[in-house]
Amino acid sequence: MKHMTEEELIAYREGVADQGALISKHLAACEECRTELERIEAVLAALDTLPVPDPGVDYGRRMWLDGGGTCGRSHAGSRRRA
Ligand SMILES: [Zn+2]
């Protein structure tokens, strides 16, 4: 049995594999390729979460600014005409 290549498994995961049905049939029968697909998914999932280090810093600053904003808004609210 010919095993799936990493490229084929990645294409299959992205839903762009030319032989999606063939690959899914192979995966159903081949634990080795299922394990490989899981490994690839773990790597890609880790990569997906990588480009988000900045929002942590920005989030903290926004929380601080929002606190001041809420204070200002509540003063404005108490000033509103009836
Ligand atoms: Zn296989």
Image: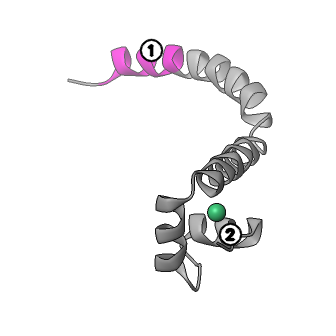
Residue range of the region highlighted in magenta in the rendering: 70-80
Q: Residue 25 appears at what percent x and percent y?
A: 46, 70
Give the Cα distance between marks 2 and 1: 64 Å
Label 1 amino acid? His
Q: Circle 2 sits in a helix, a strand or a loop, which is it?
A: loop
In the image, is residue 32 above or below residue 50? below
Q: Looking at the image, which residue is at 59% across and 53% down?
A: 34
**Going from the N terminus, do you reach mark 2 or mark 1 first?**
2
| Secondary structure mostly taken by the magenta-highlighted segment of the chain | helix
Q: Residue 16 appears at what percent x and percent y?
A: 58, 78
Query: In front here: 43 or 73?
Result: 43
In the image, is residue 53 above or below residue 8? above
Residue at the left extreme, as displayed:
82
Q: Quarter for ligand 1? A: bottom right
Badge 2: few (under 14), some or many (20 or more) residues near its Cα, within 10 Å?
Answer: many
Query: In the rendered structure, are the residues bearing label 2 and label 1 in contact, judged by CB atoms less than 8 Å apart?
Result: no
Q: Which residue is mark 1?
A: 75
Q: Looking at the image, which residue is at 74% across and 30% down?
A: 58
Q: Residue 39 appears at what percent x and percent y?
A: 70, 46
Label 2 amino acid? Met
Placement of the C terminus among the 4 image quadrants: top left
Query: In front here: 3 or 74?
Result: 3
Residue at the bottom extreme, as displayed:
18
Mark linked to residue 4: 2
Q: Residue 40 in magenta?
A: no
In the image, is residue 69 above or below residue 24? above
Q: Residue 73 in magenta?
A: yes
